[in-house]
Amino acid sequence: MTTNVSFVIPTYNGVHLLQKHLRSVFAAARKGDEIIIVDDASTDESVAWLEKTYGLTISSCEVTDAFCSVSIYKGVGLKVLINRTNRRFASSCNRGVMSAKAELVVLLNNDVSPDTHFLASLLPHFEDPDVFAVGCKELAASENDKEYGRSSMTFSRGMFIHWREPDQSGTDTAWVAGGSGMFRKSMWEELGGFDLDYTPAYWEDIDLSWRAKQRGWKVLFEPASIVHHVHESTNASVFGKNRVEIMGYKNQLLFTWKHAKGGALVSHIFWFPYHLVFTTIRSRGRFAIGLWRASIQVLLA
């Protein structure tokens, strides 16, 4: 399958990550592809480094609340979108996909380095018009290249829970990660992209894949498409590990409240006292904080 691809890379105060990983994205991109970097109002030298390294000149953008620059570097288009205010991961991804010229869009975290030929095994899947997204196999550099990317999810004790599949060789998966996967833009737009209710991060990609599957679209995993990932290097540094865990609980609850229907909803209500007591104790109070924040968010919506 020969078609152009748009890469979308959201970044916040990640100049050191761009310096390390962006060269690998250019090495994987082909002539006619484009790379879109969405800078989320960084306060470091990200924009200055991009200007200097790739000969960019930042100017007013066609989309409000931002500036942008477009350039060609070694036959690959480079577009930098700069948010005036910090809009977080989901919103930055949505904006990047909206700006993409290609029908097939690769989302990459700024701490991801793809193998040079990782596109070759992704593209054939999209010959099937029902395929919405295909995930890459992630090798976690900080865990001796432990494999990630293929995951499962179930409903247990009144909550949706997910886990990494021990077998990373299959093609079925619960969702495609927002930091290492290829998506069909037209379907993305029909779904409305990432749900901003999950801001600042976590579960938005699970939710998107869930909604795609509800429409009968395919969400797959490709074990031959390899990327190298330093997991959570940005979120952990920005929010801290405690807040990251609280965000996870908050968004797990929001996902459950959004998608649990019928008997699942009854089960959630039945198990709620258990989680309020025992999950709160096990999480050292983080579950209760996540519950409080999720409840306030729903009440104020």
Image (tube, helix red, strand yellow):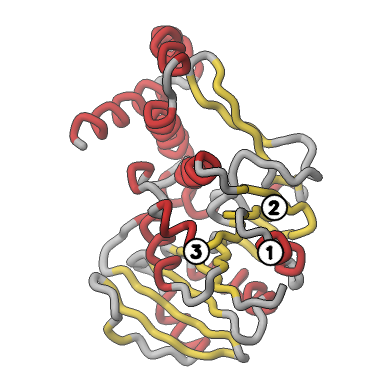
Q: Nearer the viewer, mark 3 or mark 1?
A: 1
Q: Nearer the viewer, mark 1 or mark 2?
A: 1
Residue at coordinates 70% horizontally, 62% vertically from top-left?
A: 122
Q: Earlier in the sequence, mark 2 or mark 3?
A: 2
Q: Please state which of residues 24 and 100 is positioned toward the viewer in this rendering.
A: 100
Q: Position of residue 124 (x, y in %)?
A: 73, 64
Q: Earlier in the sequence, mark 3 or mark 1?
A: 1
Describe the element under mark 1 as helix, strand or loop: helix
Q: Position of residue 191 (x, y in %)?
A: 42, 51
Badge 3 local density, few (<14 within 10 Å), some, or many (20+)?
A: many
Spatial CA span between label 3 and label 1: 14 Å
Describe the element under mark 3 as helix, strand or loop: helix
- Based on the displayed image, in which of its 4 quarters is residue 225 positioned? bottom right
Spatial CA span between label 2 and label 3: 22 Å
Q: In the image, 25: left or right of 10?
A: right
Badge 1 local density, few (<14 within 10 Å), some, or many (20+)?
A: few
Q: Is 111 above or below relative to 300?
A: below
Q: State the mark number for residue 294.
A: none
Q: Quadrant of the C terminus?
A: top left
Residue at coordinates 43% horizontally, 46% vertically from top-left?
A: 201
- Based on the displayed image, in which of its 4 quarters is residue 113 positioned? bottom right
Check if mark 1's residue and mark 2's residue have beta carbons within 8 Å: no
Residue type indicated by callout 1:
Glu
Q: Is 38 above or below relative to 216?
A: below
Q: Is 101 above or below relative to 207?
A: below
Q: State the mark number for residue 127.
A: 1
Spatial CA span between label 1 and label 2: 23 Å
Q: Quadrant of the N terminus?
A: bottom right
What residue is disc 3 on?
A: 185
Q: Earlier in the sequence, mark 1 or mark 2?
A: 1
Residue at coordinates 59% horizontally, 80% vertically from top-left?
A: 33
What residue is disc 2 on?
A: 138
